[in-house]
Image (spheres, grey):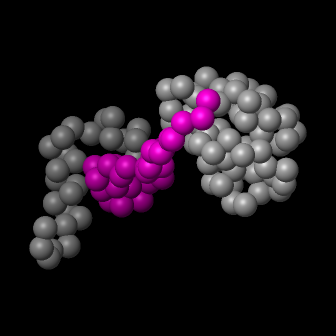
Amino acid sequence: MTPFDHIKSLSKTKQYAEDITEFVPHLTNISFSLYEDTILLANEMNMLHELPDRMQYDFYFYAVRPRSRYTPWPKKTTDENLAAIQEYYKYSTRKAKQAMALLSDEQIEIIKKRLYKGGPE
């Protein structure tokens, strides 16, 4: 079984897995934090992360009501202004965020124009 099969068995099929060698509590917590009805359960397991995998699996197995749950995993969005500042000044993300707070919109547009390499937009 893959970690995602364990998540499916906990949330939809409710088939108890005897072998949980592929159970990844962190991924399970992330998955259950995406839904209104299981976010508090995921928070509880985040606070009790030191529990053995079997105890965490059992907690979810008995606490989560069976339901079909599907949400695409959230993707990190890229801010083109932040990317331009990072490239122009050769800054890390943290420093670029600090610089972006100091720069005006006009200054950021100038930076983007200077970085423009041509080609279709």
Dominant secondary structure, magenta: loop
Q: Is residue 71 above or below residue 37?
A: below
Residues in magenta, as a range? 65-94
Left or right: 60, with 72 as reference point: right
Magenta includes 2?
no
Horizontal and vertical percent position of residue 90:
42, 59
Residue sitting nearer the eye, 80 or 69: 69
Residue in the image at 70% along x and 27% along y: 63
Q: Nearer the viewer, residue 65 or 101?
A: 65
Residue depicted at 63% across the width and 54% down the height: 4
Side of 64 where 17 appears, left or right:
right
Q: Residue furthest left?
A: 120
Position in image of residue 53 (x %, y %):
83, 42
Picture residue at 15% right of the left edge, 43% below the top = 106
On screen, residue 21 versus residue 93, left or right, reads right
- The answer to whether residue 28 shows anywhere in this view is no
Residue 105, how many percent across, how many down? 18, 40
Based on the displayed image, in which of its 4 quarters is residue 99 positioned? Answer: top left
Counting every numbered tag in the picture gives 0
**Image height check: is 61 above or below 115?**
above
**Residue 65 appears anywhere in the view:** yes
Of the 4 image quadrants, the one containing the N terminus is: bottom right
Is residue 76 shown in magenta? yes
Which residue is located at x 36 percent, y 61 percent? 87
Say left or right for 101 vs 37.
left
Which quadrant does the C terminus fall into? bottom left
